[in-house]
Amino acid sequence: MNAASPNSQANATPAPLSVAVLGCGSRGRTYSRLIAFCGEDYRLTAAADPVAVRREAVSSLGPAGQIRVFASADELFSAGKLADVLIIATQDSQHFGHAMRALELGYDILLEKPAAESLARCEEIDALARRLGRRVALCFVLRYTPFYSEVKRIIDSGKLGKIISMRTHEGVEPFHQAHSFVRGHWSRSGTSTPMIVAKCSHDADLICWLGGAGLSSISSYGDLTWYHPGNAPTGAPLRCTDGCPASESCIYDSRRYLGDKRRWLGMVMDGFEQAADHEILEMLKVSPWGRCVYHCDNDVVDHQVLACELTNGITATHTMTSFDFGRGIEIYGTLASLKGGIPYSEAGAPELWLRHHADGRIEPVDIPQPNNAGYAGHGGGDHGLVQALGSLFSGPERLEPGLDGLAGHRLAFLAEEARVTRRTIASSPASALSPQS
Ligand SMILES: NC(=O)c1ccc[n+]([C@@H]2O[C@H](COP(=O)([O-])OP(=O)(O)OC[C@H]3O[C@@H](n4cnc5c(N)ncnc54)[C@H](O)[C@@H]3O)[C@@H](O)[C@H]2O)c1
């Protein structure tokens, strides 16, 4: 039993799991709000962020004085261990340092993905967590959505028979690609991680989690084909705000942040809800999000495919493309195939359905919506993950020590190695881990 975690089976009324938040940006605030919404089960105790308005947004979620605030990670760590669980929601390149320090202090961790900027560093986090007997859960929120929970339940029920292969698909959507992976935080692999890790580590995790095994071997192809100067409209200036001749027809025109794309500012502009149009325009004139998408310093791919084999023989492919919208999945079993996701539901088909091989029957699947969580916040996954915190970190079903989700990260990082080297990569014996590892 974790001494700092009072959620004991023996207690008639278990004390709440205490949680501190490092990084109160978009993700940190989302988890904090959901934790506050969960009422008695959790207690927020501390929040750290150099931006005052962000840490104060978290501290305002509790009664006065309950949530201590800190202006940096250093300050938070210097105060000792302040909670059972530390949520680390800083930027990608900070995760490794923050996670290693938090483990040494005795925290269990809910760590935003990617765990680190290289596979070797992910393995270091795993090794330290195992040595110290600490648990690190990655924010693989899709596992906790009603949709993927149902996919997993159907696989485990045996209704599909033996699983032979699967196909996953992620359409990032052009404006999302531009906002996050051309103009934004994840546009350069050197300062964040490669696209297949930054965006598709969820899909890599799903392949291992649903497939029930780690990676055996992988190949991958992809490139940055569209978002570069060679495709810029004639006469396009460096910034959309500098009078672009193509602005009327360009789907990436940054002035759309003033209109139908305004919600994307929530991730990059404090106080965007109250901001006047002229304030947003001023921001676009100087920030990365006002740049022409064909004149950025981006280097991550806009399309990538991978093909792999898991240690149990299941084969899987994944397609990531800027030029489609939404995730989809197909799982091929000996008795039935299971298909679903946005590409189907958008076209009027059921969101999830089985095709039985015996008679060709199509069986739509009802997806339960626990607690009316709905589909907001990563398809309900943000809410589902926060609800699962208690069982992940305390009680009899809690995680084993180590980095949960390492197998999916291994798959994603080795996909990038395969793409760059144009080789098929056999995973090391260490990857023959359970999908939970
Ligand atoms: N699980 C998912 O589906 C998902 C989705 C989006 C983003 N992410 C990941 O979540 C992480 C956070 O993303 P975000 O969109 O919230 O980014 P963000 O930039 O909005 O938030 C990061 C926060 O960390 C703060 N910060 C920087 N240095 C700090 C320090 N030394 N100490 C404390 N705080 C510090 C920043 O001020 C900022 O508020 C990223 O790693 C991202 O890749 C995960």
Image (cartoon, helix red, strand yellow):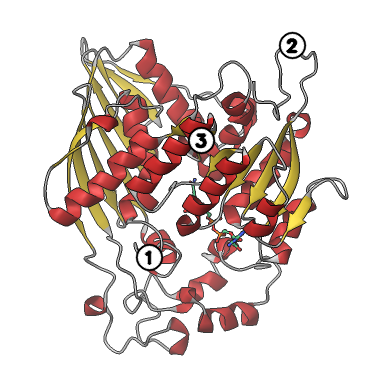
Tag on residue 10?
Answer: 2
The reply to whether discs 1 and 3 touch (Cβ–Cβ < 8 Å) is no
User: Judging from the image, what secondary structure is the residue with disc 1 in?
Assistant: loop
Q: Amino acid at mark 3?
A: Ala
Disc 3 CB within 8 Å of nearest ligand 1 atom: no
Name the outermost residue toward the right. 64
Give the position of the N terminus as an image quadrant.
Answer: top right
Asked which quadrant contains residue 376, the reply is top right
- In this picture, residue 102 sits left or right of residue 58: left
Q: At label 2, which amino acid type do we have? A: Ala
Give the label, 1 or 2, closer to the camera. Answer: 2
Residue denoted by label 3:
137
Q: Residue at x 14, y 54 (%)?
A: 421
Along the line of sight, the residue nearer the viewer: 418 or 177 = 418
Circle 3 residues within 10 Å: few <14, some 14–19, many ≥20: many
Which numbered disc flags the more N-terminal residue, 1 or 3? 3
Q: Is residue 186 visible?
A: yes
Name the residue beneath numbered marker 1. Answer: 187
Q: Nearer the viewer, mark 1 or mark 3?
A: 3
Residue 123, position as x, y percentages in the image: 37, 40
Residue 277, image x and y in percent? 63, 78
Q: Position of residue 374 (x, y in %)?
A: 58, 35
Alpha-carbon neighbours of circle 2 within 10 Å: few (<14), some, or many (≥20)? few
Task: Tell me which residue sits at (30%, 57%) in the image.
Answer: 323
Vertical relation: 403 (above or below) 248: above
